[in-house]
Amino acid sequence: MPNVSSAPSSAHFDPTETIEGDLTGGLLLLCDHARNAVPPEYGDLGLPAAEFERHIGYDIGARPLTVELAERLGAPALMTTYSRLLIDPNRGEDDPTIVMRLSDGAVVPGNARIDHAERESRIARFHRPYHDLVDATLDQMLDKAPPPVIISIHSYTAVWRGVPRPWHAGILWDSDERAVRPFIDQLKVQGDLVVGDNEPYDGALKNDTMYRHATRRGIAHALLEVRQDLIADGPGVAEWADRLQPILEDLRQRTDLRQICHHQSRSDRND
């Protein structure tokens, strides 16, 4: 079993959670939106509890899937412990949407009048420690072995603004296709999946997690999005772990992916 760090409590709120794994094994798992917790001093941000159970609070099913894959693969996994409503770790520090005042129709009173000092405080206390942990872990992995493949695990709603989403899963990416093409191909060959290529979102976002830790370092990577209704319970998580385990095993064994190769981000081309 992996060593999973303790969850945050009212006495101490650790913004990160680490699952220990083989730093030479060629794979690093990330989960940016793993939990929907808020430190006690922020209360409920003025929102009903039900809002934190929605996709605006966290990526439903993403943490259990990440934990299951880390256990099966013996891979390290790094996750946040706080709700994206507090601050979004998958945004750059300069992104105006890093703290959302309005999220999918929900006004967030605790964010409505946030000033520069509070924004900087949340970055320092919650956002930056996660990215510092990812940087430090990658430094250790690069010291011990060829570069790992980075897989970031997310989930998305089955319906958006009244429109059903046909994809069972999507792979998001920017300019580096090395891990993306075999990932998509191996999902499609399973025969019963509709797989999105940069759907339901585009993978090029300046200074997000993949930009900062994979694109800038030249490390092969992919961002996996699984539809939330498919991983909302234990059987769904187990099914998707069964689907994903052999794919990730294959990716980390490919020598062409275990090399530094820089690709210019599409988000930089107009700079």
Image (tube, helix red, strand yellow):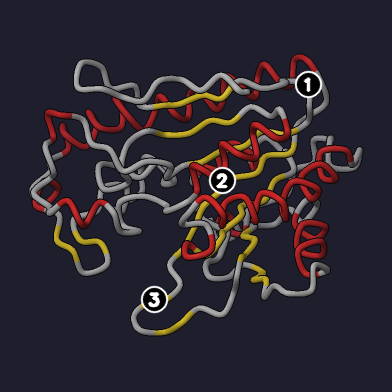
Residue at 80% from the left image edge and 35% from the top image edge: 260
Residue 33: horizontal and vertical position, in percent? Answer: 42, 45
Q: Nearer the viewer, mark 1 or mark 2?
A: 2
What residue is disc 3 on? 160
Nearer to me, 240 or 260: 240
Relative to 254, 111 lies left or right = left
Relative to 15, 186 lies left or right = right
The quarter of the rendered structure image containing the N terminus is top right
Nearer to me, 195 or 68: 68
Q: Are marks 1 and 2 in contact (CB under 8 Å)?
A: no
The amino acid at mark 1 is Thr
The amino acid at mark 2 is Leu
Of callouts 1 and 3, the N-terminal one: 1
Taking 209 as reference, is 127 above or below it? above
Residue 270: horizontal and vertical position, in percent? Answer: 55, 61
Q: Residues within 10 Å of mark 2 (few under 14, many from 20)?
A: many
Relative to 127, 215 lies left or right = right
Find numbered disc 1 in the image and state the secondary structure of the residue it sits on: loop
What residue is disc 1 on? 24
Q: CA distance from mark 1 to mark 2?
A: 22 Å
Residue at 17% from the left image edge and 51% from the top image edge: 49
Taking 31 as reference, is 75 above or below it? above
Find numbered disc 2 in the image and state the secondary structure of the residue it sits on: helix
The amino acid at mark 3 is Trp
Quarter of image, res 239: bottom right
Q: Residues within 10 Å of mark 3 (few under 14, many from 20)?
A: few
Q: CA distance from mark 2 to mark 3?
A: 22 Å
Relative to 190, 172 lies left or right = left
Give the total of numbered labels.
Answer: 3
Q: Which mark is residue 65?
A: 2
Q: CA distance from mark 1 to mark 3?
A: 40 Å
